[in-house]
Image (tube, grey):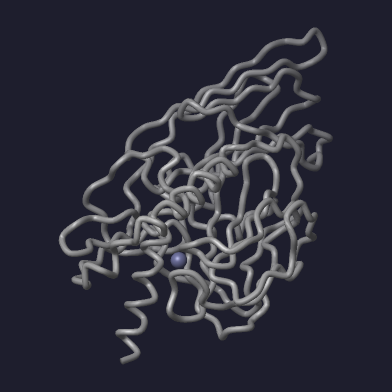
Amino acid sequence: MVKQTERFVSLTLVLLLAWAVAPLRAQTNPGQAPAAQRPSAASTGFFKPCGAAVTLRLTSAAARQGGLLELTLSSRGPVAQLKGEWAGRALPFWTGAAGPSAQTVQHALLGVDLERKPGRYELNLAGQLPPGDASFACHASIDVAAGKFAIESLKVAPGFVELSPEDRERANKESERVHAIFARLTPERLWSGPFRIPLTGSRSGHNFGKRRVLNGTAGSPHTGLDIPAPAGTPIHASQAGRVVLAENLFFSGNTVIVDHGLGVYTFYGHMKSIHVTEDEDVQAGAVLGLVGSTGRATGPHLHWSLIVDGARVNPLGIVGLKL
Ligand SMILES: [Zn+2]
């Protein structure tokens, strides 16, 4: 009985995913294997000199679908005209605290969409350093491997997956709105400090990237992490930011999206109630609402998603980073 309930809960999430963040960069990846929920971020890192005065560091030179890399660029002085591009997209940078040798440090996050095609992707950086505005350039290749995601085949009553025309129209409109939000890039960094798991006491979740085959038809992957908790448990903002959506949506029920700036968004679904309003600035840890089972969910849990520069990544990947 419990098992059935769990299956039903997760089934609703699949439907949510189909909508929640349908591929911003749709690419397919056949042949996934079972789940590793925490993306790898090798502590050893990857270093590369970019000329005499600049050093590039990545948390790893390799990544998996749904993973997240942190880029750090250290230099002897302030960098002008800094530009970075990875896999064809411009990287938003922020300036970090100076290092022990009074260096200037720039940071960026490289999100790997959970459906990015495995392969080698090029990272290019360029900028200028005073005095004399000497230019520098740097290049690195990052290998993206297939993610390890679960696959589950289910047979369900046709009516369960087929929405009425009205529901379908509503869900599609909401999906377009959510996509439009994630496509926006707020140029300022609104967060400050490390990101946290939104539920106090929770250390993990499940179902990220999980793929379901319903009645023989492959569905969209589950784009977030499901964290079970009793109804009414407070949901805290992972970090500071601005609430850009706070309303009831068809699939994810009572939903809050927080814009943390620089293309970083967190998404919280199935809330019992919402305690913030759109355009409200929230501090890290602020209570956004309470855990519930609104929308297409049959049991209380938090659906938590993370978007980094358009990429749908495992939100646990940002929790350990010292941002
Ligand atoms: Zn979910």
Hey, which quadrant is residue 32 in on the image?
bottom left
**x then y, percent, for residue 242:** 74, 52
Question: Which residue in the rendered view is the most extreme toward the top?
Answer: 132
Question: Which residue in the rendered view is the most extreme toward the front?
Answer: 166
Question: Which residue in the rendered view is the most extreme toward the left?
Answer: 216
Of 139 and 243, which appears nearest the observer?
243
Question: Which residue in the rendered view is the most extreme toward the bottom?
Answer: 1
Residue drawn at point x = 43 percent, y = 70 percent:
296
Q: Would residue 210 be found to the left or right of residue 151 on screen? A: right
Hey, which quadrant is residue 8 in on the image?
bottom left
In what quadrant of the picture does the N terminus appear? bottom left
**x then y, percent, for residue 177:** 55, 45
Q: Would residue 58 be found to the left or right of residue 289 on screen? A: left
Ligand 1 placement by image quarter: bottom left
Residue drawn at point x = 68 percent, y = 77 percent:
234
Q: Eyeballing the image, is 142 above or below 63? A: above
Hey, which quadrant is residue 10 in on the image?
bottom left
Q: Eyeballing the image, is 323 above or below 144? A: below
Q: Is residue 40 visible?
A: no
**x then y, percent, for residue 24:** 45, 40
